[in-house]
Amino acid sequence: MNKSVHIYSPATVANVGPGFDILGFALDQPGDEMLVEKTEGDQHIIIDESGTGLPLDPFRNVATVAIDAMLDDLGSSQKFHLTFLKKIAPGSGIGSSAASSAGAVYGANQLLGSPYTNLELVPFAMKGEKTASGSAHADNVAPALLGGFVLVRSYDPLDIVSIPGPEGLYCCIVYPEISIATEDSRKILKTTVPLEKAIAQCGNVAGLVTGLITGDFRLISNSMQDVIAEPIRSFLIPEYDEVKKAALEAGALGCSISGSGPSIFALSENEDTAQKAGKQMEKVFASAEIGSSVFVSRVNKQGIKILSEES
């Protein structure tokens, strides 16, 4: 049985358009690189070589919280040594805590002989998400573990559905140099929704899922409308309306907030359009003297992958 595994855990986009807390997908880049090793000690050990200032306390780090949830279910006292080699920036809105949580349980599961399927690992990874944001949502950890687009049909009981997407679909992500805490971003959302908005949101979710399954880009574009979370959260992101306008004028199918922000994502029919949209979105931030990073990626259909193993 392997003693260590070097894994890549991808960034993810959650709250896809109207799919708040229920729809997400995995990206090829950026992502976490993590070395997971068994240890004979009496507690988990966390080493941060990523330079992102991760908490080293195993009771506060989302990765070890997620692993402990899995170990409790197994009735195991095994401990692990986690080394974070590369890390998605915390507070970026592209699944930083999910990459850690999902990657950790995936790696530990591999070293324990794979007692769980990737789907069965989702609830454990959700425990890490709860530590990070106060909410055990699955729309980041599920696509990280399963790849592709994922729909969380229900949380009680948990019911996760993988959705096929069009082959040519690309995403550009623009991450401005500001930070928004997921927990803070959730607090500003209203707890009740007018019936008219609920109906519109349900229609858009159904249309978006149908468009993804059938490869209907027009339907995907028409359905990328969030009438509940985006109007409230967009005020937290400087130049949001102008950035979205730039993406759509560049030919993007749709544009919205990635997760809780501040990253903004746009879906496109091909790589060229995604590259163009990303550049135009970046220009808007630059004109406001806000630095940003741009990532262009296919939808990652694999999710977490093993880079190397050592027996």
Image: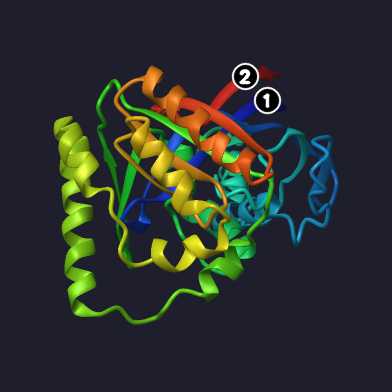
Tell me the residue that label 1 is attached to.
6
Residue 182 lies, with reference to residue 291, above or below; the image says below
Label 1 is placed on what type of residue? His
Q: Position of residue 36 (x, y in %)?
A: 71, 34
Label 2 is placed on what type of residue? Leu
Tell me the residue that label 2 is attached to.
307
Q: Position of residue 249 (x, y in %)?
A: 35, 35
Q: Nearer the viewer, residue 40 or 297?
A: 297
Residue positioned 56% across, 63% down in the render: 236
Q: Nearer the viewer, residue 263 or 159?
A: 263
Q: Position of residue 77 (x, y in %)?
A: 71, 52
Other residues around mark 2 within 10 Å, as few (<14) / some (14–19) / many (≥20)? few
Q: Are marks 1 and 2 in contact (CB under 8 Å)?
A: yes
The colour scheme used here is rainbow
Q: Quadrant of the C terminus?
A: top right
Residue 283 lies, with reference to residue 133, above or below; the image says above
Q: Quadrant of the N terminus?
A: top right
Residue positioned 57% across, 31% down in the render: 294
Q: Is residue 216 visible?
A: yes
Residue positioned 57% across, 52% down in the render: 262
Residue 181 lies, with reference to residue 242, above or below; the image says below
Residue 181 lies, with reference to residue 67, above or below; the image says below
Mark closest to the chain's N terminus, 1 or 2: 1
Tag 1 secondary structure: strand
